[in-house]
Structure formats: structure tokens, C-alpha cells
Amino acid sequence: MHRPRLLQTALLLFAPMAFSTARAQDWPQWRGPNGNNHAAPGAAAPTQWSETSGLAWKTPIPGRGHSSPTLFGDRIYLTTCDEDAETQSLLVIDRATGRLLKQTTAHVGKLLPKVHPNNTHASPTVACDGRQVYALFGNDLAAWVTAFDLEGNAVWQKRATGFDPRRYEFGFGSSPVLAGGLVVVTSEYDGPESAVVALNPADGSQAWLSPRTQSLSYSSVARVPVGGQTQLIMSGNRRIAAYDPASGRELWGVAGSTFATCGTMVWDEAQGLAFASGGYPDSFTLAVRTGGDHAIVWQNNVKCYEQSLLVAGDYLYGVSDRGVAYCWRSADGQEMWKERLGGAFSASPVLVDGKLYVTNESGTTFVYAATPDGYQPIAENQLGDEGFATFTPCDGRLYHRYAKREGGQRQEYLVAIGN
């Protein structure tokens, strides 16, 4: 497959246009086709369900993981880890029926020595460009990307860069992002290979590498439109930084953020602002200009650490680690309202038909209106007793991964909520 003519053909097959083939009702990567965690315009979703009602199907999932479902065509792609067998795998699930079609092992052994109790060995969400599926795992003290075909057969596997934290061994967390015809991976840790790296989808070869500070952080890059171009913007290590998707060149950077962040940045294109929150050891939520002087426009001390924020209209929404939902005016940070939901949160809110859906770590999903006019609750729903993955809204359904303890044993499920 390395002969020049075949390689040239492969590169043509994986031209950048392949990354725009997702249908409106596909969800090809973390935070959806546009990276904003918004369902497609005109989409709908149910507001009430339970273990015994409102589910189209319910499928037991082997192993443990916190990755969210990726949907493309008639398939759902999800990662998992069997910690006893020390395997990290890709699951392929039928979108219509929930039937598990295939489980393909990417790694056997060499799991990262330690992970945080709220993390897993299968937390990054996979990305799909319509031709291949890209799974990112922390394994053998490195960040590894495995490409699979749409049926779940492994095509190639590459070590993207190192991941060998010495001070905080909390495991791996960032998700691969498709941008500029490349697969972009972030691996930040207190070692010499801390970097943002882009791989060619045809063979996994390195397209570019941009070094990051040798310090631990977990955020994925956000694909932010700025002046008609896409910039890869991320928080972490006390900076907000933007990169060129084609070359990896740092376009700009400004002091801000805190040492460690996990959430993916969000943006308000009309206002020319991007937003970040976190983290460790400091708590913050801030807005930064994506153009001009790149100044920090406003900042407060609310902490949304593992979970990402969400922009809807002229307003910014978030749920803090302490279980308080907020609405701010994006232009100046004016607090419009706040409401205590209860519980701890790791999952991020999604927007469907003017409604926000977000699940706490105990499996309770809160549904409320995306409006600045006060907190307007719509429903609360319970599935299982553990919820860390973010909803995937497609097909008038909500696809959701959760866990439940039954007879003393923990079992994960993937469900389709809706008709």
C-alpha cells in the first residue's frame, strides 16, 4: 500500500471535502458537526423518559467508558475498555435497532498506570469523516490514534505523541477533532512531547506538530470561525491560544485561563468572542476577543471544569461543578439568572429546539429552556445511577450512555430515547 500510485489515490480519497459529507442528522465527532453541541435546525427531542418508558431501544455495553456516541450513516461508534482484560476497543452499533454489530480491539495491555476515579481508559469521543473512524486512546504512556473503516475493521494505528504525566496521573481526556482535512490530537502533560498534533487520515503520518507547555491540561481544540477562516482555539496552562489548522502555526495567544482545563471552548461569532471555563487550581469563566487585540473582555469565578459551556443566541449557558446552572449575556458577562440543579456534573449541555439537556453524575437529566428570562424547568428524568457522557441528539432522539449497578455489578447501557 506504500507504492506511489496507490498512495496518491489514497490521498485523493481523503481530500478535505470528505470531512463535509455528514448529513444534517449525523453527529460525526465531539460536540457535533459544527462543534457547538447544537442539534440540527428544526430537530426535536423528547423531554420525558424513564427506565421503562420512552426508549426506542436499550443495549448493554461491555466494559467501561465515558466517550459519547458518534453517529454516521446507519452506524453508531463508541469506545470502551475492559479493565480486567486490559483491552481498549471500538464498538459498532446499529443505529436503528441498537444491536451490537462489532467490537474491535485497538490495544491489549499497557493501559495508563493510573486514572482519576471520574475518568476511564475510554473517555475520548471518536471522530468520523465519512470514510474512516478515528479513535484516540491513552496507552503505553502515549496518545495513540487508530483508524477503522466504517464496518469497524482497523486500517492503521499511529503513536501521535507522548502522554506520561508524573505529577498528576489522572488519565487521558481530550478527543480527536477533524479540521482542515486532518485529524487533530491534543496531549498536554509535564513532559517533552506535550503538543497539539495533526495526522493525515490516509496513513496516520504526521502533518504538523505544535509544542505545548510542559504541564498537564485536558482540553480539546475548538474549531472557531474567525473572519471567514477556521482557527483551532483552546484553553489551558494559563493561556488562550489559537492555531492554524493547515500548518499548526500559533496565530495568537493571550494570558488567561488557569493551569488545567478540560472543557472545549465555545464561541459567539457575531460578537467575535470565545469562552472558556475551569479549572485547577483557580476557578474562572471568561470571554476573549477572537480578533483585534485578543483581550479578555470579562471574567468571573464560576468553575465549569470537566463540562463545556454552550452558546445559544446572545447568551452563554453553563452548569458549574457544584450543580448550579447559569445564564450570562455573552457580550459583557452580565448574569441573567442562576439556579441550583443539584449533584455534580461532568457531562456538557446540548441544545435541541430551544431546550437545554444536561445530566449529572448520578444519572439525572435536567431539561430547561434556553432563555435569559429566568430558569424555566421543563422536566427531570432518571436513567441508572451514573451519567458522565454527553447526549448525542439526532433523528428526533437522544442517544445516551449511562451506567447502573444491578446486583452489586456495574453495567453500562447505550439507549435511544424517543420513537
Image (cartoon, grey):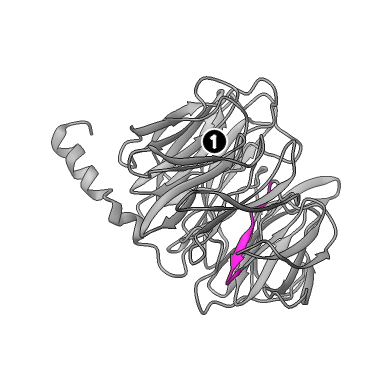
Question: Residue at the location (35% across, 52% down)?
Answer: 131
- Farthest residue in the left direction? 5
Q: Which residue is mark 1?
A: 137
Decide if residue 338 is on the left or right side of residue 230: right
Q: Nearer the viewer, residue 281 or 417?
A: 281
Q: Amino acid at mark 1?
A: Phe
The quarter of the picture where residue 111 lies is top right
Q: Nearer the viewer, residue 313 or 203?
A: 313
Decide if residue 373 is on the left or right side of residue 397: right
- Farthest residue in the front direction? 293
Q: Count the marks: how many?
A: 1
* Residue 357 magenta: no
Q: Residues within 10 Å of mark 1 (few under 14, many from 20)?
A: many
Q: Is residue 142 above or below residue 61?
A: above
Visible in this render: residue 29?
yes
Visible in this render: residue 151?
no
Decide if residue 407 is on the left or right side of residue 165: right
Q: Nearer the viewer, residue 154 or 355?
A: 355
Q: Position of residue 139 (x, y in %)?
A: 56, 28
